[in-house]
Image (tube, grey):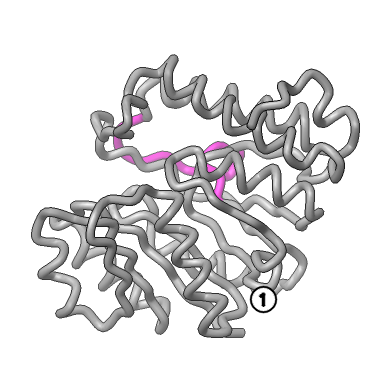
């Protein structure tokens, strides 16, 4: 099976080369989505043996992932693995994703930093970030676990996706709330989800979410708004209990 490794990048000049070179030790097909970087990332990319999508302005994490999905579909890949470029996803764990892909019993293989077998290195995430992940993961499980199975990490970006399964989704979220839209649509389409342990690595506790989302309460409310909107949109495809009490947001 042909597998693409897709790496969204935004101002990653300090880690870009080392991450990509380590990824290339495990993968032959690599796509970098440069989301409007204003640092030296843009000049470093042409020197690397990777395909490149370049956004002239910053369009958001979700848009970068959606563009990677579109590339994988257009170029007839079977799977796409997404990972970050800030050294918080371990390139040496790619073979474990490839092994799970070869098992061929899931449509989404989702990295989890919080499974019993997961390891931790370096700093721990700021408490408010861990708290929001815990809250949103619990709310997803309350609504969707009958279809997705229990999740332990709603926001980990280290994932493998079966490309044919992505063709059934209508994803439009550009920002960091993209996972909420994805999980609801994955449940509505009955995609098979399996989690795999990945290392919890946190190097930059001050990294900004942008768009006013650095305030924890604002970010949590934004995530909930996207989640409820998506649940409302797909209420006819989900079990009645999954959308009970959901606002009919537009």
Position in image of residue 33 (x %, y %): 33, 65
Image quarter of residue 43? bottom left
Which residue reaches farthest top? 217
In the image shown, does 157 or 233 lie closer to the viewer?
Answer: 233
- Magenta stretch encompasses residue 123: yes
Q: Is residue 82 above or below residue 228?
A: below
Residue 94 is situated, as x and y percent measured from the top left of the image, at 47, 66
**SS at mark 1?**
helix
Tell me the residue at 29%/57% (across/down): 35
Residue to which mark 1 is pinned: 102
Q: Residues within 10 Å of mark 1 (few under 14, many from 20)?
A: few
**Is 223 located above or below residue 146 in the figure?**
above
The quarter of the picture where the N terminus appears is bottom right
- Image coordinates for residue 215, horizontal then vertical, percent: 35, 18
Q: Is residue 29 above or below residue 83?
A: below
Q: Is residue 45 magenta?
A: no
- Whether residue 18 sits left or right of residue 68 in the image: it is left
Q: Is residue 140 left or right of residue 75?
A: right
Question: Main structural element of the magenta stretch: helix, strand or loop?
Answer: loop
The stretch of residues the image draws in magenta is: 111-124
Residue placed at 54% from the left, 57% from the top? 159
């Amino acid at each position: 099976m042909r597998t693409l490794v897709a790496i969204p990048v935004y101002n990653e000049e300090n880690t870009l080369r080392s991450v990509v070179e380590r990824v290339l030790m495990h993968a032959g097909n690599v796509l970098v989505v440069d989301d409007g970087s204003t640092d030296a990332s843009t000049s470093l990319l042409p020197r690397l043996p990777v395909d490149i999508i370049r956004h002239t302005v910053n369009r958001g994490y979700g848009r970068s992932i959606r563009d990677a999905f579109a590339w994988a579909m257009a170029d007839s890949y079977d799977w796409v693995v997404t990972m970050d470029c800030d050294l918080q996803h371990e390139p040496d764990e790619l073979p474990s994703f490839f092994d799970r892909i070869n098992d061929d019993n899931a449509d989404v293989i989702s990295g989890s930093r919080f499974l019993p077998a997961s390891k931790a290195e370096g700093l721990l995430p700021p408490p408010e970030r861990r708290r929001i992940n815990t809250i949103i993961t619990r709310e997803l499980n309350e609504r969707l676990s009958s279809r997705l199975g229990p999740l332990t990490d709603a926001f980990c970006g280290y994932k493998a996706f079966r490309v044919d399964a992505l063709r059934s989704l209508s994803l439009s979220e550009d920002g960091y709330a993209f996972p909420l839209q994805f999980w609801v649509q994955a449940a509505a389409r009955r995609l098979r989800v399996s989690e795999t342990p990945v290392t919890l690595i946190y190097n930059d506790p001050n990294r900004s979410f942008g768009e006013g989302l650095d305030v924890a309460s604002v970010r949590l409310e934004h995530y909930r708004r996207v989640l409820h909107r998506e649940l409302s949109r797909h209420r006819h495809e989900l079990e009645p209990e999954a959308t009970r009490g959901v606002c009919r947001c537009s």
